[in-house]
Image (cartoon, rainbow, N blue to C red):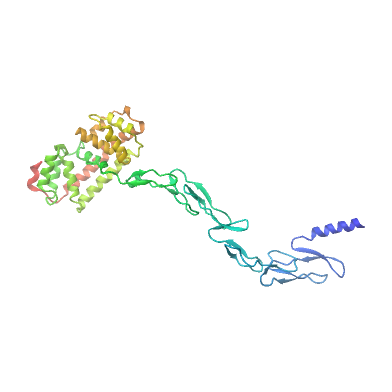
């Protein structure tokens, strides 16, 4: 008999947790009853009987039940949130009051702690939440962080070359790169596009004869033209005539168009060269590959120190031209490339082809048309050059 009762009790305990139901004995008849549980937000006011279903009642204020139940009372809502917490969800009949750590803090066991700040050299990979701390990561190459912060990611280091500046101090994981303006030493007196235009094989035999009749007398005086004649070789007169005319005619739309065309050509030259990582050895080998006198080593070192890529090559070609009183385009055609590194050899070949190619010739034709379209003439000055 005891064994049967024991087994019966085990069965009653098992089925008493059936979802949505609970079991009880009727106190009058001792019959096992299957009663309905009460839904969330309510409690059992009166158990079921043989003739009546379970009676449920709403939870009173500041009480809740968050699941189906057969409790005789609802649970009491938490009174207040802890220090550095705020109420995320107020208490209602089906949910207890929910607390959350205040902004900038996260829950660690029972306490709200400040989010960790990533130190210099590290950036925030994932911001902290009320439940989790900040996730930091070391700044990769080319990026930096110079602050301790729980919100700031690593930043890209500034690219001096893209700004037309040179590197004054190389950046690290904890500091940005510092830039500074290029030295005026890096400026070239005559651009490669200008030289190509005025020395193009199919160009007019005497650019001076083309230019002078079209130059406005209020822009270039006879004295200025004579000064250019006395200061430079005849082959260089067109460069300086045109350069002076450009500098003194900035308000003239036609000249503005000419300047823009030439500037676009010079930008294209920079693309042909590319941002090669040059060394003193590279530039010395370039000088040794050009005909005539080479630029001195100390000048090459100064170029690398003062000028940004790719203007280093433009400057060294300019110094070579001045030293040899020569023609840069012809010099590039005579370049012996067997001494040059592969990347530099390819860049110089691209440059030579561009300066002697159809793009420059089309620019030459366009400029000739614009110059011939000028309205004014100098009259008697034609015979000065």
Tell me residue 81's x, y (percent): 61, 65
Position of residue 86 in the picture relative to residue 193 (left or right): right
Residue, far top? 338
- Kindly identify the residue that appears in the image at 24 percent across and 36 percent down: 319
Q: Quadrant of the C terminus?
A: top left
Tell me residue 20's x, y (percent): 74, 63
Q: Is residue 60 visible?
A: yes
Q: Can residue 352 be seen in this view?
A: no
Residue, far left? 380
Residue, far right? 1
- Foreground of the two, 35 or 133: 133
Asked if 359 appears above or below 374 in the picture, the reply is above
Q: In which quarter of the image is the N terminus?
A: bottom right
Asked if 163 appears above or below 317 in the picture, the reply is below
- Foreground of the two, 326 or 187: 187
Where on the picture, by quarter, is residue 212? top left
Tell me residue 361's x, y (percent): 24, 40
- Foreground of the two, 11 or 304: 304
- Kindly identify the residue that appears in the image at 20 percent across and 32 percent down: 324
């Amino acid at each position: 008999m005891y064994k049967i009762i024991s087994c019966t009790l085990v069965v009653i305990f098992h089925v008493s947790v059936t979802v949505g139901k609970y079991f009880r004995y009727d106190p009058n008849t001792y019959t096992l009853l299957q009663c309905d549980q009460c839904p969330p937000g309510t409690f059992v006011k009166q158990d079921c009987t043989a003739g009546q279903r379970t009676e449920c009642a709403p939870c009173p204020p500041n009480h809740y039940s968050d699941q189906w139940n057969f409790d005789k009372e609802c649970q009491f809502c938490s009174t207040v949130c802890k220090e550095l917490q705020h109420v995320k969800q107020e208490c209602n009949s089906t949910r207890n009051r929910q607390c959350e750590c205040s902004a900038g803090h996260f829950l660690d066991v029972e306490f709200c702690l400040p989010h960790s700040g990533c130190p210099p050299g590290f950036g925030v990979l994932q911001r902290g939440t009320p439940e989790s701390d900040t996730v930091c990561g070391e700044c990769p190459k080319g990026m930096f962080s110079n602050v301790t912060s729980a919100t700031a990611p690593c930043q890209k280091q500034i690219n001096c070359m893209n700004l037309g500046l040179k590197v004054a101090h190389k950046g690290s994981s904890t500091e940005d790169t510092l830039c500074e303006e290029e030295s005026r030493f890096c400026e070239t007196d005559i651009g490669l596009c200008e030289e190509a235009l005025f020395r193009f094989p199919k160009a007019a035999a005497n650019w001076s004869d083309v230019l002078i009749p079209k130059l406005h007398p209020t822009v270039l005086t006879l004295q200025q033209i004579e000064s250019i004649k006395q200061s430079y070789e005849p082959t260089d007169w067109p460069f300086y005539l045109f350069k002076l005319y450009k500098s003194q005619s900035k308000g003239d739309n036609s000249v503005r168009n000419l300047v823009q065309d030439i500037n676009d050509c010079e930008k294209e030259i920079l693309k042909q060269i590319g941002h090669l990582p040059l060394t003193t050895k590279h530039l010395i080998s370039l000088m040794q590959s050009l005909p005539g006198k080479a630029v001195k080593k100390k000048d090459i070192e100064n170029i690398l120190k003062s000028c940004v890529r790719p203007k280093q090559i433009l400057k060294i070609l300019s110094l070579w031209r001045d030293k040899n009183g020569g023609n840069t385009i012809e010099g590039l055609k005579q370049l012996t490339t067997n001494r040059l590194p592969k990347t530099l050899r390819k860049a110089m070949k691209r440059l030579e082809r561009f300066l002697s190619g159809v793009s420059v010739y089309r620019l030459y034709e366009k400029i000739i048309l614009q110059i011939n379209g000028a309205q004014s003439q100098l009259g008697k000055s034609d015979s000065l050059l």
